[in-house]
Image (cartoon, rainbow, N blue to C red):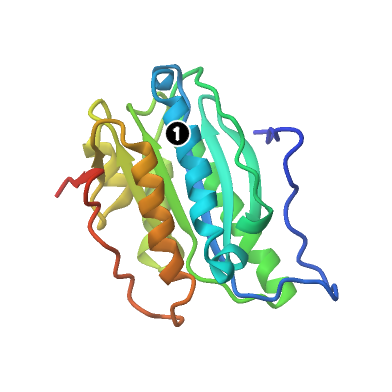
Amino acid sequence: MAKEYAVDFPELEPLGDDMFLNAERRCPVILLLDTSASMADNIDAVNDGLQLLRNDLMQDSLASQRVEIALMTFGPVRLIQDFVTVDRWLPPRLYASGGTPMGAALETALQQIQIRKRAYREAGISYYRPWIWLVTDGAPTDKWHPAAERVQTEVLRGGIEMFTIGTDNADTSILSAISRPRPPVRLREAKYREMFVWLSQSLKPVSRAEFGASLDLPEPVGWGDIQA
């Protein structure tokens, strides 16, 4: 499947030998966002949330250099922004259209993580376990089981942290199969802005943690309900 890149956004941050290289350890996060047609009523809240995420992380000078954001949408699957540190990230304007090819989106996200890990290793840059942050308001419109199995393999061997967030119309049984043992979170009242602020507030301490430290995240108070 060919990758599609949006124009006028920063390219993948170089990791070569350069005197200006950002040598900070990295905390990579893929935002895997459902932009199918059913998201039309909430896409503005998603766009506002992305800006809030960036602005809040920029308040922490270390996190802004360590947290790397990649942005991928599905409906169709598009890599809007490859990994770039927050201090170089310009959140785009997203639009809603198409179906919900969640399986293909997960496969592509895993591929991008492997590419980025390889780049880190080649440049001698240490990194925290990558996060995939999947947000959807529906159910997959493609074959998702193979992708879920690959995600589970990566989770079990410690290769990624997988998070799934769904609205009232999302199929939480599918999200649970993708993210277990971490349960999915049901998003309250389309509180996308609050969700992204929570994400920022969680990433800040993670980006300062010692390697191997347990992931102790706050409850999604005010914006979500854990679906145990």
Is any part of residue 106 visible from this angle? no
Q: Residue at the location (46% across, 81% down)?
A: 211
Q: Is residue 225 visible?
A: yes
- Residue nearest the viewer, comparing 82 with 222: 222
Residue, x 39% and y 19% (percent of image)? 41
Seen in the picture, residue 219 relative to 63 is either above or below; the reply is above
The answer to whether 88 appears left or right of 154 in the picture is right
In the current view of this chain or complex, which residue is farthest to the front?
Answer: 59
**Could you classify mark 1 by the number of other residues whose Cα lies within 10 Å: few (under 14), some (14-19), or many (20 or more)?**
many
Q: Position of residue 199 (x, y in %)?
A: 40, 54
In the rendered view, does 206 fall on the left or right side of 14? left
Q: Residue at x 74, y 46 (%)?
A: 10
Q: Please, what is the three-letter code of the amino acid marked with disc 1?
A: Val
* Closer-to-camera residue (195/118): 195
Residue identifier under label 1? 46
Secondary structure beneath dot 1 equals helix
- Image coordinates for residue 2, horizontal then vertical, percent: 69, 33
Residue 132 image point, x, y percent: 45, 52
Q: Nearer the viewer, residue 26 or 53?
A: 53
